[in-house]
Image (cartoon, grey):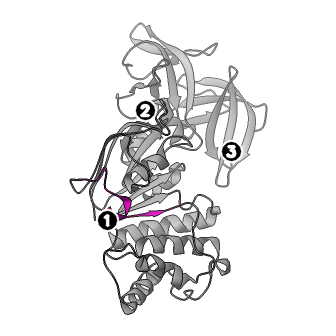
Amino acid sequence: MAHIVLKNATKRYNGSKIAAVDHLSIECKDKEFLAILGPSGAGKTSTLKMIAGVEEISEGKLYIDDKDMTNVPSQNRNVSMVFESYALYPHLTVRENLAFPLKAPTRIQKLTKMEIDAKVEEWATIVGLNKLLDRKPSQLSGGQRQRVSLARALVRSPEPNVILMDEPIAHLDAKLRNSMRAELKRLHQDVGATIIYVTHDYVEAMAMADRIVVLNNGNMMQQGTPKDIYENPLNEFVASTVGEPPMNFLRGEIEKNKNHYDFIFKDQLPLKLEFIPEKPGMVDLGIRPSEIQVSHQKPEQSSFIGYVENILPTGAKQIMEVNVSNTMVLVKTERDYTYHKGDMVHLLPAFEKICFFDPMNKKRTSGKDGENCNG
């Protein structure tokens, strides 16, 4: 397969001074599944297209297996790309769609009809389409068409060094997305491919990737394993992007009180911290909704007081919107908790899960042990 290095890559469109991708450096190891996560406009697809050679790199370099591929035409990079849209030929059968890239006139390696048929049968079996080869796309479900698109990207001979996927399952329904995530993960394990997968869905990235790169406005916010990204967000953007519901942020001040520190939030009683923060002063306290205990009775530890504004059932769990001094705090609880709109409740954050962020640059300053603020 392949080892990919994108070094200080910048992409500007039509001479614009604003970069769609700004001096981005990422590495995808051989046979790794790397997810690029971010919202619309983050630069995800532009990054993928630069690797594929569909878009030129305005500045920077691309290396594949230590070879400089920056100016190498896309057809000579041995890279396959799977798009969000199926891009299938409607007048061709599944068999003909899969065979099409094997017959391309620009191919360096020419294959016989027997070799083409064998390749088509092999990949149709891998993605579970071997019984549907004579159907046309209009006769297939959305999930089946997506598998045809995937198999067509992989059917090439020689096999592609890199497989690039641009939100390939974004428009499928929830059940199909879950199924396709499992299929893609299995395919990666079976084929041992080097995969770079673009998505705006953190669940997809967490479920499938070996590592995640989080982008925003063309800049890297953080990279690491799914566990690292979730448990140790480096800034408020990552903390709010990874997790559902997103992390709560409360703007307040840390003050020293004799032999301990308090977090002061509006008119609430001081929240006594069970650890020494990195620095006192104004901070944003971050806590995930799943790491807040809610009760009608005042706990022994210091806590926040609020009023239930809304309760949103989500199946096994429920999301409570609690008004804490005119700031909405989300709390994730078990569905059998008996609370009603207007109830006064006490919120006790798990102190070992608290993050503090600088309110100016939004970067994390510390958690309980200076590292973890997970949930």
Q: Which residue is identified by label 2? A: 352
- State which tag comes first along the sequence, 3 or 2: 3
Compare residues 97 and 229 and report the one nearer the observer.
97
What residue sits 59% from the left and 15% below the top?
A: 269
Q: Is residue 223 above or below residue 74?
A: above
Q: Residues within 10 Å of mark 2 (few under 14, many from 20)?
A: some
- Specify whether residue 129 is in view: no
Q: Secondary structure at mark 1?
A: loop
Q: Which mark is residue 238?
A: none
Q: Nearer the viewer, mark 2 or mark 1?
A: 1
Residue visible at 38% across and 75% down in the picture: 156
Choose top left, top right, bottom left or bottom right for residue 363: top left
Which of the two discs, 1 and 3, sits closer to the camera?
Answer: 1
**Pointer 3: residues within 10 angstroms few (<14), some, or many (20+)?**
few
Hey, what amino acid is under mark 2? Glu
Query: What residue range appears in magenta?
Result: 68-83
Considering every residue shown, the one lying at the far top of the view is 258
Q: Nearer the viewer, mark 3 or mark 2?
A: 2
Marks 2 and 1, how far apart at CA? 43 Å
Q: Which residue is mark 1?
A: 161
* Residue on which disc 3 sits: 337
Q: Residue at x 34, y 68 (%)?
A: 160
Real-space Cα distance between discs 1 and 3? 52 Å
Residue 362 in view (yes/no): yes
Q: Mark 3 and mark 2 in contact? Answer it, CB < 8 Å.
A: no
- Mark 2 / mark 1, whichever is N-terminal: 1
Density class for disc 1 (Cα within 10 Å; few <14, some 14-19, many ≥20) is many
What amino acid type is highlighted by mark number 3? Tyr
Q: Position of residue 263 (x, y in %)?
A: 50, 16
Instruction: Examine the structure image and report whether residue 79 is included in the region drawn in magenta.
Output: yes
